[in-house]
Amino acid sequence: MGLVAAATVVGVTVGGSSSSSMPSGDLPGWRQGFAEDFDVDAPLGSFPGSAYRDRWTGYEGLPDTSGAGRYSNERVVSVHDGVLDMHLRTEDGVPLVAAPTPLVGGSWGGQTYGRYSVRFRADAVEGYKTAWLLWPDSDKWADGEIDFPEGPLDGSMYAANLCVGHAGTFCYKSDDLATFTAWHVATIEWTPDAVTFYLDGQKVGSSDSSPRKPMHWILQTETDHGRPPASSSGHVEVDWVTVYERAPSSDE
């Protein structure tokens, strides 16, 4: 998707959005490079398919973080009624999960610094969680990790930033912020100076341990540290996503 010169942004607070409408266009200091409103249906088994393959990818057939679940866009993800729908459930004894990934500029990764927003909600599905994150293109944990929203779907979400140079160590982790069952907008702003988190347009935390290497954004939705009950089933819905890069300053 090309860059948009002028902003058309309804209900946006600078730094975050509380609007149900997808922001379209640039924001002060940010240039929009990707926007997805999920306006073309894609039945289960056809995502990304012809409608989305130029803009989305994801893990297919790989074990999730706990090892209990199996990532599969094909078996989990559909698009209908203007939302991307991840149907989490167990089939043939295997918990099915998904990690859809936007191809910003048509590429997996390659962006250093950015602004990432997503409007979403979820059923309170026992045994499943989100870990929507920016992960280093190098695949080296010590290069950093930024998570928001993270947390169990039947509990509360939080924001986290892991320390650069110290794999697996939190430099920042918020308190519980909200439950998943209502619609929310989560925003990460990643700059050379800080990683800042906004929920529904309100700043909820910040960390000065800022990754310096390219990262990619993954809507990683998975089992919550082990095998969920076989009867556990429900949906995670994504209304829209946007990605921005830093706009050049006048002295650049």
Image: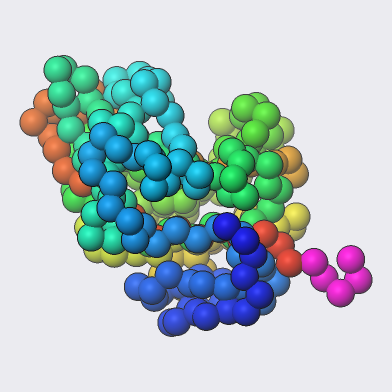
Specify whether 7 is left or right of 179.
Answer: right
Specify whether 119 is left or right of 45.
Answer: right
Q: Against 143, is 21 above or below?
A: below
One can see residue 128 in this view: no
Instruction: List the single residue furthest toward the right.
Output: 251
Horizontal and vertical percent position of residue 114: 64, 56
Q: Against 229, is 215 above or below?
A: below
Magenta-highlighted residues: 248-252
In which quadrant of the rendered view does residue 223 lie? top left
Instruction: List the single residue furthest toward the front.
Output: 50
One can see residue 87 in this view: yes
Main SS type for the magenta part? loop
Horizontal and vertical percent position of residue 216: 58, 42
Residue depicted at x 40% and y 20%: 62
Q: Nearer the viewer, residue 46 or 32?
A: 46
Horizontal and vertical percent position of residue 230: 12, 26
Specify whether 166 is left or right of 152.
Answer: right
Q: Nearer the viewer, residue 198 or 23?
A: 23
Q: Nearer the viewer, residue 36 or 216?
A: 36
Query: Is 250 one of the magenta-colored residues?
Result: yes
Residue depicted at x 57% and y 73%: 25
Query: Is 112 one of the magenta-colored residues?
Result: no
